[in-house]
């Protein structure tokens, strides 16, 4: 029996990183982040139902710099997960599997998620 120490399956060192690979990982990570964001939405709803003092505490936390960063990350996670999910729907229909199409759709997912995030924040701050 051989005593060499090598991976039994292809390891991350074998592959070179690509945009498609990163988006696959980000899609999973944003799914987890959206679960955490759901706790924020739950806190918001409970604060509204509890009364003005609880809601003011929520507004104070979410209005801080750290709160705004969390909300921005939550918004971007939502938009990236949405756009990548739409791409997966096309893949489920058997469309867009060739390398050029996957690379174009990866760039489109990133660009559209950034645009949608900026658009949501612009609408939220009444800039549009």
Image: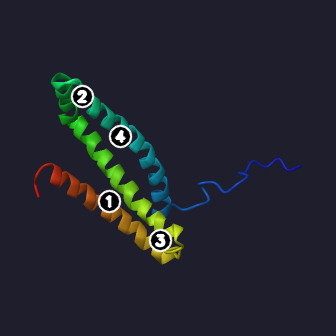
The answer, for residue 7, to whether it is visible in the render is yes
Q: Earlier in the sequence, mark 4 or mark 3?
A: 4
Res 111 quadrant in image: bottom left
The span from disc 2 to disc 3 (Cα, nearest Å) is 45 Å
For image coordinates 10% across by 52% down, the residue present is 126
Q: Which residue is mark 4?
A: 37
Residue 116: % across, % down: 27, 59
The answer, for residue 18, to whether it is visible in the render is no
For image coordinates 28% across by 29% down, the residue present is 46
The span from disc 2 to disc 4 (Cα, nearest Å) is 19 Å
Q: Which residue is mark 3?
A: 102
The span from disc 3 to disc 1 (Cα, nearest Å) is 16 Å
Outermost residue toward the right? 1
Outermost residue toward the left? 127
Of the residues tagged 2 and 3, which is closer to the observer?
2
For image coordinates 25% across by 35% down, the residue present is 66
Mark 2 neighbour class, 10 Å CA radius: few under 14, some 14 to 19, many 20 or more = few
> Mark 3 near mark 1, Cβ–Cβ under 8 Å?
no
Q: Which residue is mark 1?
A: 113
Q: Earlier in the sequence, mark 3 or mark 1?
A: 3
For image coordinates 32% across by 45% down, the residue present is 74
Q: Which mark is residue 99?
A: none
> Mark 4 near mark 3, Cβ–Cβ under 8 Å?
no
Res 108 quadrant in image: bottom left
Q: Earlier in the sequence, mark 2 or mark 3?
A: 2
The quadrant the C terminus occupies is bottom left
Of the residues tagged 2 and 1, which is closer to the observer?
2
Of the residues tagged 4 and 3, which is closer to the observer?
4
Residue 55: % across, % down: 19, 28
């Amino acid at each position: 029996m051989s005593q060499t120490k090598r991976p039994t399956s292809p390891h991350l060192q074998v592959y070179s990183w690509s945009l498609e690979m990163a988006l696959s990982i980000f899609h999973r990570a944003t799914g987890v982040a959206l679960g955490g964001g759901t706790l924020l939405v739950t806190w918001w709803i409970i604060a509204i139902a509890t009364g003005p003092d609880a809601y003011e505490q929520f507004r104070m936390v979410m209005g801080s710099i750290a709160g705004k960063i969390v909300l921005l990350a939550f918004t971007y996670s939502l938009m990236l997960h949405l756009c990548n999910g739409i791409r997966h729907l096309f893949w489920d229909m058997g469309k867009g599997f060739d390398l050029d199409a996957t690379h174009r759709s990866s760039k489109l997912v990133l660009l559209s998620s950034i645009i949608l995030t900026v658009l949501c924040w612009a609408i939220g701050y009444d800039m549009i």
